[in-house]
Image (spheres, coloured by chain):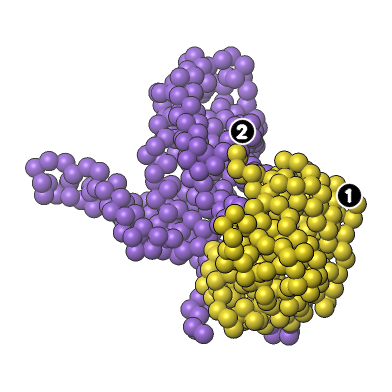
Chain colours: A purple, B yellow
Amino acid sequence: MTGAGTVSEFLRRRSTTWILLVPMLAIGVLLHFFGTSLQVNIYTYFCVNLMIVLGLQIFMGNSGILAWTHVGWMGIGAYVSGILSMAPMVKSLGVPNMYPFLVQLQVPHPLIAIAIGGVVAAMVAAVIGWPLMRLSDAAGVITLFATLIVIHVILTQWDNVTNGPRTFFGLEEFTTLPVALVGATLVLLVARWYRESSLGLRLRASRDDRYAAAAIGVSVVQVRYVSFVLSALIAGLAGGTWAHFITSFQPKAFYIVETFMLLSMIVIGGQGSISGAFAGTALVTAAREGLRQVEAGINNAGVFTFEVYGLTELVMAVLMVIVLIWRPNGVIGGQEITWPIIKRRR
Amino acid sequence: MLKVENLYASYGAIRAVHGISLEVAEGELVALLGINGAGKSTTLKAISGVLRPIQGSVMLYGEEIGNRKPEAIVKKGISLVPEGRDIFGGLTVEENLRLGAFASYDRARYKEDLEEMFGLFPILKERFHQAGGLLSGGEQQMLAIARALMSRPKLLMLDEPSLGLSPAMTDQIFELIVTLRERGTTILLVEQNAERALEIVDRAYLLATGSLEFAGTPDEMKRKVDLTSVYLGGDEDETCEVRL
């Protein structure tokens, strides 16, 4: 290879990260100093969503397996980090039935709590994933879905830990815009690295053709398992970050509705690439916030005699159908955006 | 180097191979011939570990590998190019090649092998960053072979490399097989095109309904076996006719 070839090759490989990261950080910094509080809030929410969706991409995007459990890991991360970061006083107020030893348990910094939340989610995933990753196709997807239901039932029924179906509240609002930006940046780097790593590559090969992958020596179960646990770790961390942004939540925040929101983000953008997951998250977050304003506007203006409700979900569903027909692999598709963005066709 | 003894393999209840024994020596180019359903592909799958043999032994350099997993067998130095060019269509050419090398990845060696592949298959350099699925049939076959070569196999097994290719492309693939063999690669080739295969191989085995019918050099095979009747059907109950 010539010198120029090596340089352009280097640029090509690294460019995706910069194309995504530079605008994300630039807008974040601008908003931090000049944005309104609503803008800052929306952008923080976008960054947290980005963490969750990129975590989802690590497993689902690379393996092609519909990861129903993802919001479950997020929920585990949220509750664990909440319990660990809250002061005993606040906890006994918010969750009257909590086990006494849990009430006393507090780590000195929310970051430590979020980290432990991620590790706990990953450990649960490591146990559940062991048998589940041996299943494929329909059986695999159904058991993952069933696992989500099990997690949900535990979250709603374990009164002494989660306050049951009632709201769990009183978290410190630790996740500010800078925190979310750092979190999203780290997760983006990990997801980028993972997709290109040997493990990620083998996982993508198994998505393409499981049998061909086995023939060249890929241990499909093993690569799926490792990715499943890594994905759960990031979901747990993202869940903790989310919890310290929202500050009060219920178990139903980690169930079907949220799952579909995440799926629409990753499917609309394109689950096969980091660029796709990123674009989908940006698009859906923007559309969702925009539609919410429209909905409020219509209701306030009294255009109809009844309240307009569910416009967001409706438009998201239509958007998803259109994207699936028009570009089944998502707006961006399975390949990363690289420099130069517009290529001459050969 | 490779010694297969009394190999049995089946798909569930259907037994596809019963009691095949064959040998491949270092540097040899050996063909497995026979009609559809004779058990050729099954034999390759059993050797590569994709299909676990139910009985018999597969020895590589005197070491039993018959019950190993495919990934372990690839590491031992046996690479299979499956029938129908099982390349990864959603991955780029570069990623396909990197996957071939992953079993024993070494950055310097990877670069070196890549240059070698570009020498053998210039088209792959042109298409380096394109998705494998966008390549033509012949190019995909070349990619599949290049991918297998990236693991520096001691034994390369090709399952019907000319399947579905144009005559011109078939010529190219056969030329390539000869080139590879001259480079010192040991090759076990499964081919439908027996006439073409017999022109280039050192020895050939003829399979019929899961067992070995004949083994020998191409000359012996041409002299003693009526290949036309093997492929086009001779007597009703004789799958194959051996003139002794």
Depth check, front residue: A114 or B224: B224
Chain letter of the residue carrying label 2: A
Question: Where is the N terminus of chain A found, in terms of image quarters?
Answer: bottom right
On screen, residue B19 above or below A19: above
**Crowding near the residue tagged with mark 2, few <14, some 14–19, many ≥20 C-alpha atoms within 10 Å:** few
- x and y percentages locating residue B149 in the rendered image: 75, 68
On screen, residue B171 above or below A321: below
- Alpha carbon distance from label 2 to label 1: 32 Å
- At a point 73% along the width and 65% down the height, the residue shown is B243
On screen, residue B24 above or below A79: below
Outermost right residue: B62
Label 2 or label 1, whichever lies nearer to me, is 1
Which element is circle 1 on?
A: strand
Q: Which residue is mark 1?
A: B63
- x and y percentages locating residue A83 in the rendered image: 56, 27
Q: Quadrant of residue B212?
A: bottom right
In the displayed structure image, the side of residue B54 where residue A93 appears, left or right:
left
Depth check, front residue: A149 or A33: A149
Which element is circle 2 on?
A: helix
Tag of residue A131? 2
Chain letter of the residue carrying label 1: B
Outermost left residue: A305
Tag of residue A283? none
The type of residue carrying mark 2 is Pro
- x and y percentages locating residue B154 in the rendered image: 83, 63
Do we see residue A247 in this rendering? no
The type of residue carrying mark 1 is Glu
- At a point 39% along the width and 50% down the height, the residue shown is A264
Q: Quadrant of residue B141?
A: bottom right
Do we see residue A331 in this rendering? yes
